[in-house]
Amino acid sequence: MKKITLVLSMVLFPIAGAFAQIEKPVTWSYAAKKVSKTEAVLYIKATIEDKWHIYSQNIKDGGPVKTTFSFSPSKDFGLVGKTTEPKAVVKYESTFKMNVSYFENSVIFQQKIKLNKATTVVKGKVEFMVCNDKQCLPPEEVEFSVPVK
């Protein structure tokens, strides 16, 4: 009886696990580059799986959840301006009944910071929503930590 239970668990658990996998079509990576003794640029990159897209920071109300960055306050640095992004694809999406701006494949967002200390760690969160031509996944929030040396 124990052998049957063991064999069944070895067969059924991996199958159940395959069905329970959560889709994660976006991966994030981070880097920083000092441009002077008192300034640096953060690079926040989204790598997006084929046929998926994430939305711009510049989406009007009533549409999808726009990509939003929030940075934890610190005495070690200050933000200079807003987070910038490259030119996005603009397309009418019938789901939202409006033109939306989005990115496919990959996108690098940039944030300038003024350094009050030679080295620091910039922490924050990015909230985003990812869609393809069939579905949108619920908005997700990802925390990040970027060392500036």
Image (cartoon, grey):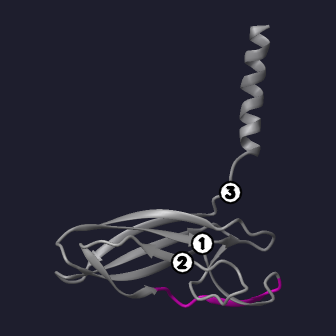
For discs 3 and 2, the disc positioned in front in the rendered view: 2
Residue 60: percent from left, percent from top: 66, 90
**Could you say which quadrant of the image residue 67 lies in?**
bottom right
- Label 2: state its secondary structure: strand
Q: Amino acid at mark 1?
A: Phe
Q: Which stretch is magenta?
A: 84-94
Q: Quadrant of the N terminus?
A: top right
The reply to whether residue 148 is visible in this rendering is: no
Pointer 2 with pointer 1, Cβ within 8 A? yes
**Residue occupying image coordinates x 76% and y 36%:** 15
Mark 2: few/some/many CA within 10 Å (<14, 14-19, 20+): some
Residue 40: percent from left, percent from top: 27, 80
> Quick one: label 3 or label 2, which is nearer the N terminus?
3
Q: Nearer the viewer, residue 97 or 10?
A: 97
Q: From mark 3 to mark 2, how far is it between C-alphas?
A: 21 Å
Mark 3: few/some/many CA within 10 Å (<14, 14-19, 20+): few
**Residue occupying image coordinates x 69% and y 65%:** 138
Q: Which label belongs to residue 128?
A: 1
Q: From mark 3 to mark 1, how far is it between C-alphas?
A: 14 Å
- Label 3: state its secondary structure: loop
> Quick one: label 2 or label 1, which is nearer the N terminus?
2
Q: Which label belongs to residue 53?
A: none
Q: Which residue is identified by label 2?
A: 68
Q: Which label belongs to residue 23?
A: 3
Q: Amino acid at mark 3?
A: Glu
> Quick one: label 3 or label 1, which is nearer the N terminus?
3
Q: Is residue 50 left or right of residue 120?
A: right
Q: Amino acid at mark 2?
A: Thr
- Label 1: state its secondary structure: strand
Mark 1: few/some/many CA within 10 Å (<14, 14-19, 20+): many
Q: Nearer the viewer, residue 33 or 56?
A: 56
**Could you say which quadrant of the image residue 16 lies in?**
top right
